[in-house]
């Protein structure tokens, strides 16, 4: 037991490890990852957190839909920012303030390019949840009247459900729900049936965090716009995997979180059409979002900048921009091929587990490697605990999407989710550990 006072804190240990990592003392896996190595070997080597054992087993991280791991490039960008450029940003102030400002605004340009938007339309938020709340409070609340309708789907995450229910209660508007099919796809026939002149907004997840299906977002937007309504896309699960172009999608608002796409926690993007942002009142007020602030008057900043009250989170956008650059440096079609292979492989492996019921599409196309399931005779909590003892990280519970789980006839489920660094061997280990829980396990060898 180390002596009190000399005992290293977890943070100090982390810094030491990170320092060693940056000074070139990398893992064996990383060391072998030359530029000629297969993509998956190089990708895995880029993520220091994958290189550890959990409960005596190598970590199999299958919880990327909840949050991804961060590549060393993102960790380095954060460290570099704090080491060299940290200051309260200001375009015309001292050198560090100018550098912080340039990094912050450079990140805004990077994220704008990532979704084919104008930087003035990029609002920094804490994540998808805050972005949706901002739209609900600053756009919907002053505009909704009794009798107006908000159209969601039953597959929405709680963060794209509760903000609308609250704003409906506050304004007398009604929330209506689109049905999904038995595999969790939004039903376009139901969309056509429920869109009316009363619909003020359609808000839907591009990809459900449970089913993994990629909804036809551009088609949903086109139908909504034909009906004369506005559309918000919850891109929390799609931004990490699917190229996003707000112009060709035809939406009015789009929201995503940095931590689900290799960036830091506590930062995300709300994109809004410039004219809508200009027309909205501020969500929060304070410094940095107004000029000429006197005792009785002020002039608000324009477009997205109106929503940046207070000292900004600079390192968050800097880290998120580094994540976007990291993704941009990879062969995007190689990632897509890898994810399609993981989808096919995972579906096959899980189909072999006796008593396992998959929730979501069983087909490979138009879906991501997200596998939600229930196992006969074992609660999702038991499944999670068992897998944890084997070093396999998944998620269990209501997955913040209870209405969809109920649509599937369950109230809890387990979910294994993948990203570019996931190896098919992780899915082998998942299936093998699940088989250990099935009643027939071990009988063959007796
Ligand atoms: N929508 C979807 C589809 C999600 O998967 C999540 C996160 N699980 C959210 C919204 C909320 O994202 P955050 O917690 O990062 O705000």
Image (cartoon, rainbow, N blue to C red):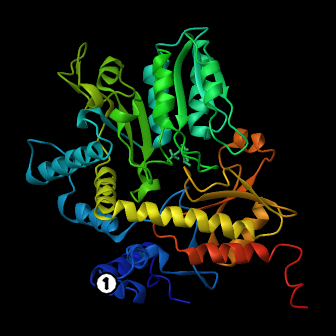
Mark 1, residue position: 34
Which residue is drawn at the image coordinates 65% and 26% (left, top)? 190
Residue 67 to residue 423: above or below: above
Residue 40 to residue 117: above or below: below
Q: Which of 185 and 79 is in front in this view?
A: 185
Residue 102 visible to an observer of this rendering: yes
Say which quarter of the image contains residue 363: bottom right
Q: Where is residue 49 in the image (x, y as percent from the top left)?
A: 46, 74
Q: Which of 375 and 346 is in front in this view?
A: 346
Q: Is mark 1 within 8 Å of ligand 1?
A: no
In the rendered structure, the answer to whether residue 51 lies left or right of residue 15 reads right
Q: Where is residue 342 in the image (x, y as percent from the top left)?
A: 55, 66
In the rendered structure, the answer to whether residue 114 lies left or right of residue 147 reads left
Which residue is drawn at the image coordinates 32% and 57% (left, top)? 319
Q: How crowded is mark 1: few (under 14 residues within 10 Å), some or many (20 or more)?
A: few
Residue 419 visible to an observer of this rendering: no
Q: Quadrant of the N terminus?
A: bottom right
Q: Nearer the viewer, residue 444 or 32?
A: 444
Q: What element carries label 1?
A: loop
Say which quarter of the image contains residue 135: top left
Q: Quadrant of the C terminus?
A: bottom right
Residue 80 to residue 286: above or below: below
Residue 283 to residue 430: above or below: above
Numbered disc total: 1
Q: Where is residue 29 in the image (x, y as percent from the top left)?
A: 42, 86
In the rendered structure, the answer to whether residue 402 lies left or right of residue 446 reads left
Q: Position of residue 358 (x, y in %)?
A: 73, 56
């Amino acid at each position: 037991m180390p002596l009190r006072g000399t005992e290293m804190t977890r943070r100090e240990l982390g810094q030491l490890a990170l320092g060693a990592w940056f000074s070139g003392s990398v893992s064996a896996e990383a060391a072998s990852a030359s530029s000629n190595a297969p993509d998956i070997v190089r990708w895995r080597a880029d993520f220091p957190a994958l290189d550890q054992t959990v409960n005596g087993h190598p970590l199999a991280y299958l919880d990327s839909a909840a949050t991804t791991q961060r590549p060393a490039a993102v960790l380095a960008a954060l460290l570099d920012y704090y080491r060299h450029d940290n200051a309260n940003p200001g375009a015309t102030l001292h050198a560090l303030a100018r550098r912080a400002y340039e990094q912050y605004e450079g990140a805004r340009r990077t994220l704008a390019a990532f979704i084919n938007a104008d930087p003035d339309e990029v609002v920094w938020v804490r994540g998808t949840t805050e972005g949706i709340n901002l739209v609900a409070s600053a756009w919907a609340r002053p505009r909704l009247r009794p009798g107006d309708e908000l159209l969601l789907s039953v597959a929405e995450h709680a963060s794209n459900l509760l903000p609308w229910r609250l704003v409906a209660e506050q304004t007398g508007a009604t929330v209506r729900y689109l049905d999904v099919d038995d595999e969790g796809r939004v039903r376009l026939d139901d969309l056509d049936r429920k869109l009316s002149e009363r619909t003020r907004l359609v808000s839907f997840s591009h990809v459900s965090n449970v089913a993994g299906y990629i909804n036809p977002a551009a088609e949903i937007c086109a139908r909504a716009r034909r009906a004369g309504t506005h559309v918000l896309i919850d891109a929390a699960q799609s931004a990490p995997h699917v190229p996003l172009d707000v112009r060709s999608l035809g939406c009015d608002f789009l929201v995503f979180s940095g931590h689900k796409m290799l960036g830091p926690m506590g930062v995300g993007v709300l994109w809004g059409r410039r004219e809508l942002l200009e027309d909205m009142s501020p969500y929060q007020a304070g410094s940095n979002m107004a000029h000429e602030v006197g005792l009785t008057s002020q002039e608000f900043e324009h477009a997205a900048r109106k929503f940046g009250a207070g000292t900004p989170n600079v390192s968050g956008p800097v880290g998120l921009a580094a994540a976007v650059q990291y993704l941009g440096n990879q062969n995007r079609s190689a990632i897509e091929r890898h994810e399609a292979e993981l989808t096919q492989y995972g579906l096959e492996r899980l189909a072999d587990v006796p008593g396992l019921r998959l929730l979501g599409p069983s087909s490979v196309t138009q879906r991501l490697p997200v596998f939600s399931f229930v196992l006969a005779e074992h609660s999702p909590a038991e499944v999670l605990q068992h897998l944890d003892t084997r070093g396999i990280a998944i998620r269990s519970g209501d997955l913040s999407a209870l209405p969809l789980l109920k649509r599937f006839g369950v109230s809890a489920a387990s979910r294994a989710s993948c990203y570019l660094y996931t190896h098919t061997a992780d899915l082998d280990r998942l299936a093998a550990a699940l088989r250990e829980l099935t009643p027939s396990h071990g009988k063959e060898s007796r």
